[in-house]
Image (cartoon, rainbow, N blue to C red):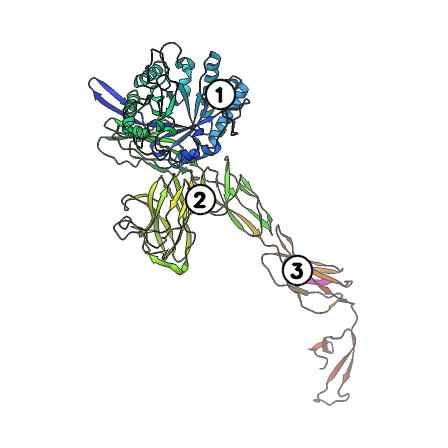
Amino acid sequence: MTKKYRLILTVFLGFFFLNVSAQEIVGYYPSYRGAARALNVPYDQLTKVLYCFINPNTDGTLQKSPGDALFGWDETTFQTVKSLCKSNGVKIYVSIGGADAGYQRAARLYQVCNDPVTRNTFITSILNFANSEGLDGIDIDWEFPRTNPEKEAHRLLLQELRQRINSSSNPNLKLGIAVGGETLGGANHLQYINPQSFSYVDDIHLMAYDFPAGNPNYDPNHHSSYNDALNCINGYINAGAPAEKLVLGVPFYGRSADRNSTADYNQINTGGGNATAYNSDVYNGWYYNGKATLEAKVDLIQSKGGQGIMIWDLGQDRGYNGDPGYELLKVIKDKMDNSCLAPKPNLGPDVGVCGSTPVTLNSNVNTAAGRTFVWKKDGVIISGATSNTYSTTSGGTYVVEVTQNGCTRSDEIKVIAGQSLSVTGATRCGEGQVTLTVNTAGSGFDWYDAELGGSKVHTGSTYSPTLTSTTTFYVQEASSSTNYNAGKAVIDATKAQKEHYFKFGHKTVVKQDLTIVSMRVWTADPTTFRVVAVDAVDGKTIKYSSADISIPGGQAQVVPVNLTLPTGTYYITPDADNRTPTGGNMWTESATTFAGTDIPNVISIEGQAYMNFGNGFNADPSPGTHYGQLFDWVIATGTPPPCGRTPVTATINPGPTQPGNFTASTATVCQGQTGVVYTVPNDPSVIYEWSYSGSGATFASGQGTNSVTVDFASNATNGNISVVAKKVGCGDSPARTIGVTVNPATTASVSISASETTICQGTSVTFTATPVTGGATPSYQWKLNGGNVGTGGSTF
């Protein structure tokens, strides 16, 4: 979310209107203040921080090496300030240039920007840096382009930067400039800038301090008086600078009357809370801006319709060295907060919209008599959008303006448009490499090993893992979001017990806008519930809620939550109120000790839950001994892909195994014998292929199945019958083989004897056949006068 509250107030005073529009509080933070001091800045009182300075090398690339007093870069301090800004919803710019006694930075900027090649490299380097670091804007602080060629190089830099930003994938990146405050008589800073440049920028930071001594146009003692600020604003407006782009600079330091010495405000204001210095503009010979002058300057920039106040620099205020009290930043914040009675909208974190499914933007301001709402998309008013909520299916930058009694406040949110992905899985036989593909056009895709949470395993439109078994992966559009694991991972079954919903609250401090993506729960019954964030102030009011989550009971489950939360303190708890079916119980863990979770600049969760017995979670000021009911939190910062993850399956089919042992319809085979059947156990997932190594054998039927019939020709020879199992794409199994001995064909002969040679009618006689040739186990067919009279045995 962009924590920018714009304000417009119109008050009738006699015969004129006072137009108040300033709510920006902008602070420069120079790298030499260091990372430690940055930790103490009250970011919740700011809307924008300008981190300074970065400068180019002579070839147009950015100088990122530390140690150089003029052109060096402090990465540690930058990352600290950036992280603190992000976690507090404050915009972060990088400022380029800066002043030095020998004008070496200005000379370097001119050298780079005067050449089209190095200027283009410089612009590319700036934009790449801003986008890779997730910055909100760029500030050009060129002090100063004094000659006409320098002014033209400055103008071209701003013009081409604006053109490149507008045509880029991040057209909402802001562009600002810092300009000198002198606008009256003789040499003045208005002469250092081409008025065309005002049209290229979003913010004009007026350095209305360090006015010179001895110049009759300016205050003789004070380097940053109210009148000098007034003349500065008027001068730029008269030169064509749009008033709504102006940000009035104020000093958090003092100078001597002759301007030869300086002192930080926290050095001037000594003695553990010196109210005299706080309420004055001069103390012990130092001239600076105290409380009354700062409040007057806030009124001044508001009356001119400007953006707000800019501070040089944040490291000079009180409160950074163990001396809280009488802080100048708080003076500015309190004055602005009291300038408008319209409620401040809060659109929450940036969100995503998937395809044609709308997302509803909520101003979190109630409708009321005399209160109006205006919605804008990418700076254009949306016709008919006058409610306190707005639903959209389009990506872009949205602003809601809430107006009451002539006063307007606004908030901004980015909606990231996503698309459902078309994917193609893969199938192979046996372990090995497969290729999974995203068919949808896009700039990048991330692959994960789980539908929720899990680990990122690959980035790209294709993924080619080597697998041993069927596996499902999950792919999503690439994003700048980062996942974290928080909370207790698993439940201790020996301490598990059933408890009602909305009874245990995990006290949670959200340090930057984030999304709770998923959690693990153990339910006792089938249920429908939601995860809610309860206001930590009263312990009762549900501030934010997930959609309904329906699950069966009796098992551990990872459930999608997708609950987006802005910075703040909440009790996070499950709630089944008015859900169907309500179930009734969810497992918690009693008598447990858990250290809690603390992820710097992201989230902290207390180790034990607070109980609610109907009077709110704040009724008992101390947590109990239960952990709570929500385990294994997956947290995402940034904007997760709107459409979630799409499953893609790689199917690994097992290869065919060797067929089982043979069975044969006969143990012996003779030449000329037909109808011999061979069989192996059947596997319906394969095709069987039969072969014979000898000659004269024909597979009469059954080829492809597990049972074949073989005919042996009269000239058949010995050989092996083999069978292999085949799967499409999987190759062949090892063969199963049986040897076959083919006996030669011979003419059978037999001798017959009778039990009686002379018989009478009615007398029984037994005939016995004795084989002479034809095999060891012949079969017999008995005939009488050519007709069959018996089969089978050797006697009749």
The residue mark sitting in front, 3 or 1, is: 1
The residue type indicated by label 1 comes to Arg
Q: Is residue 721 left or right of residue 321?
A: right
Q: Is residue 628 above or below residue 328?
A: below
Rendered position, 225 above or below 407: above
Which residue is tagged 1?
105
The residue pinned by badge 2 equals 484
Query: Residue 769, position in %: x, y?
Result: 75, 80
Disc 2/disc 1 C-alpha distance (Å): 41 Å
Rendered-image quadrant of the N terminus:
top left
The nearer-to-camera label among 3 and 2 is 2
10 Å crowding of disc 2: few (<14), some (14-19), many (20+) = some
Residue segment shown in magenta: 699-717
Image-quadrant location for residue 211: top left
Residue 472 position (above or below residue 417):
below
* Residue nearest the viewer, comparing 45 with 412: 45
In space, the residues marked 3 and 2 are separated at their CA atoms by 64 Å
Mark 1: which secondary structure?
helix
At label 2, which amino acid type do we have? Tyr
In this rendered view, identify the residue nearer to me: 576 or 271. Answer: 271
Q: Earlier in the sequence, mark 3 or mark 2?
A: 2
Q: Is residue 296 visible?
A: yes
Residue hosting label 3: 701
Q: Residue at x 48, y 38 (%)?
A: 478
Residue 715 falls inside the magenta stretch: yes
Farthest residue to the top: give it.
Answer: 186
